[in-house]
Amino acid sequence: MKWLKGCAILLSAASILVTIPACNGDPKNAPEETKASEEELSKKINEPTELTVFSLESPDAWNQKYGEYLKKKLPQYKITHISQTETSRLEHLLSSGTMIDLYMANARSVKQQYIPTNLALDMSNLVKSHQIDLNAFEPEGINQMTSVEGAGGLYGLPLSNYTMVMYYNKDIFDKLGVPYPVDGMTWDETYALAQKLTVNNGEKQYLGFWISPKHYLRTNQLSLALVDPKTEKASVSTDEWNRLFDTMFKKFSDITAFRERAITAWPSHDAFNVSQELAMYVMQSSWLMAAQESLSKMNFDMVAMPTFKDKPKVGVQASYTYMGITSMSQKKNQAMEVIRQLTSEEYQMEMSKLGIMTSLKSQAVQKAYATNTPYKDKKLNMNAAFYNTFAPTAPITQYDEFVVEDGLEKTQLRDIVKGLIDLNSGLRKAEEIANQKIATSK
């Protein structure tokens, strides 16, 4: 389906994003369609209609997680899903005039992509008219989208979430005679364990601990901003960022055997679930299902991610996936019905059982987490995903990835871990690299 009759499309060379002029008016203003009476609303919802959804999900994943359920609940709707690929990114769809009614994204992507293109729609009036109870959601799920630090408006409702947990290889602990980790550990206690587990037993060089850097940096426990939203400059050479890097990366990489491994081959997921040389690995809770084929063959378990001593039980920031309605959609009430179905306790219960972390406060839904998966007989510590509280959402800007990817992950973080640059100099250099990218993008 096509759209944009009478509306120009602007292509920004700096951001390579297509922007939709506000030909529909301010998206925060309630369109007439959202002011329908209950009778009119019911009629609209039950009429046959066609909707298009855009997301990062693969076609198979979309059908398994969302499509099949929606076919059962809304058989009168024909829902077309478009997966993002190299040739079907958001800017491609907009420049070709493709109608998008619904999209799935995290708050960071909403702020970085959907707001700058004028595609994001504040759904406050639709939520009221469809009588959706926002109190049913985990508070941070709403706050991350609506707060000034987040996206700044109710541009979507949370469908799912993930946190970070610490996976551990029980066989390595057993072989080396080291007690298993437990929920509620501090980073200092984890470091002590890592020292005991970084051992060469004559057969293999074991590594005590590692973490997925990019996932952690974006959602760090101290709620530190990557970019100052006022100056739009990278902000990672502060005392608090220094403390975080020293705790999470430098301290663990100062263990000689780990540094030698990082120099020869940068550690990744495979060190835990393929070569099985890594004893403890902090990664997304959703990895439990993403890496199901390899993890199900291992003797492993998980515990809550360790915390800073002065911030007990404070985990990473939440990582919600939201579904939002676009400002271009001509079927906003029908699109809202799709969201209502996917945020219902019935649907959330089904997904929770399949190992998808719910966005609802419901204890019953949370307790059902991963009970209908290949792990159901392993007696894993599923409470690890819910043990910590979420850290407050740090300010999000459209430039954050220049810091995470260009300033840190690809360059300075690796040099710090490998001992090629001291911590203070590495963080200052990361700022310089990121600020150059930010300036170029404007």
Image (cartoon, grey):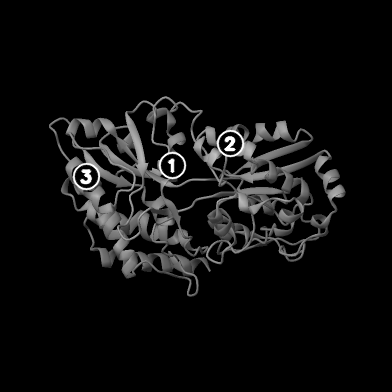
Mark 3 nearby-residue class (10 Å; few <14, some 14–19, many ≥20) = many
- Say which amino acid is labelled 2: Met
The residue carrying mark 1 is 285
Q: Nearer the viewer, mark 2 or mark 3?
A: 2
Outermost residue toward the left in this view: 202
On the image, which quarter does residue 251 sit in? bottom left
- Return the disc, 2 or 3, that comes first in the chain's sequence: 3
In the image, what residue occupies the spot 62% across and 57% down?
114
Residue under the image location 49 percent in, 30 percent down = 371
Residue 20 vs residue 400, the one in the foreground: 400
Q: CA distance from mark 2 to mark 3?
A: 36 Å
Q: Position of residue 373 (x, y in %)?
A: 48, 28
Residue at screen point 23% across, 50% down? 191
Q: Is residue 269 visible?
A: no
Label 1 crowd (10 A; few <14 / some 14-19 / many >=20): many
Disc 3 designates what residue?
193
Task: Identify residue for label 2.
Answer: 349
Residue 99 place in picture, x, y as percent: 73, 49
Q: Secondary structure at mark 3?
A: helix
Q: Quadrant of residue 222?
A: bottom left
Residue type at numbered disc 3:
Leu
**Residue 145: percent from the left, percent from the top?**
58, 58
